[in-house]
Amino acid sequence: EVQLVESGGGLVQPGGSLRLSCAASGFTFTNYNMTWVRQAPGKGLEWVSYSSGRSSTIYYADSVKGRFTVSRDNAKNSLYLQMNSLRAEDTAVYYCARGSLFFDYWGQGTLVTVSS
Amino acid sequence: QSVLTQPPSVSAAPGQKVTISCSGSSSNIGNNSVSWYQQLPGTAPKLLIYDSNKRPSGIPDRFSGSKSGTSATLGITGLQTGDEADYYCGTWDTSLSTVLFGGGTKLTVL
């Protein structure tokens, strides 16, 4: 059974940093591109970042470019999102999802709240 | 304001059919496949349609997808109260090099 489990969310002050993790199981992690998608409270879905299976191709949304860094450790079946210089508008539930152009499995999400 | 335009809400009676539209441009829907997601309250999104008209295993054939030009449509027949959810379209934008999602459509089954 495919499972994606996010962790690392929490309350952080503006300008602070947070590192999200996504633990994958039930499939050959290296063979799949992975994506971070976020959803602000009461709002729609926003694509954040994408990493190809071997991290050779990485994309970011303009809204996070230069502040967020996606990485993965295929030996640990894990995807990460390092978030720096956080802003109030980064407050959202962050989901990791399997895929690049469409997303067939999603984690349950982890809430990031940026507030003083 | 999303680049992909969906109606904010649609409604229909149980057993009826509803369609949800997703309008884009040549840089996104016009030249790329579309996916559709269902998000029940308090849960993660779930893939309903990929490659514009394909259903993943386990998705009933009450759900269908189509694409024409720069627009896509999700159809749901035999509506059930359990279909009440937010529905999102998604596609790649070649000019922006990003995945785009529509603003979402709230389906109410009256």
Image: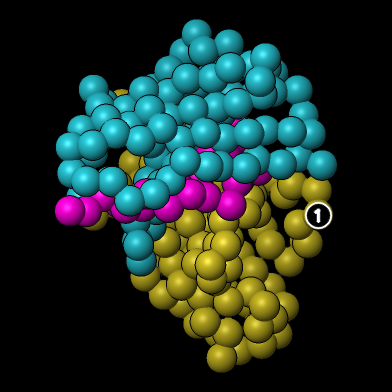
Chain colours: A cyan, B yellow
Residue under the point 64% across and 74% down: B83
Q: Can residue B97 be spotted in the picture? A: no
Residue under the point 57% across and 56% down: B44
Circle count: 1
| Magenta-span inclusion, residue A110 | yes
Taking the image as shown, residue A39 lies to the left or right of residue B59, namely left
Q: Name which quarter of the figure residue A28 lies in.
A: top right
Chain containing the residue with disc 1: B
Image quadrant holding the N terminus of chain B, namely bottom left
Of A36 and A22, the residue lying toward us = A22
Taking the image as shown, residue B12 lies to the left or right of residue A87, namely right
Of B71 and B55, the residue lying toward us = B55
Taking the image as shown, residue B45 lies to the left or right of residue B90, namely right
Image quadrant holding the C terminus of chain B, namely bottom right
Give the magenta-colored segment's residue range: A91-116
Q: Can residue A111 be spotted in the picture? A: yes
Residue B16: x and y in percent read 65, 83
| Magenta-span inclusion, residue A76 | no
> Residue beneath label 1, please?
B58
For label 1, the crowd category at 10 Å Cα-Cα, with few meaning under 14, some 14 to 19 and many 20 or more, is few
Q: Does A85 appear above or below A56?
A: below
Residue B90: x and y in percent read 47, 45
Amino acid, disc 1: Gly
Instruction: Say what secondary structure mark 1 lies in.
Output: loop
Residue under the point 43% across and 46% down: A9
Residue A52: x and y in percent read 54, 18
Of B89 and B52, the residue lying toward us = B89
Residue under the point 50% across and 8% down: A56
Residue B41: x and y in percent read 54, 71
Of A76 and A93, the residue lying toward us = A76
Q: Does B55 appear above or below A84?
A: below
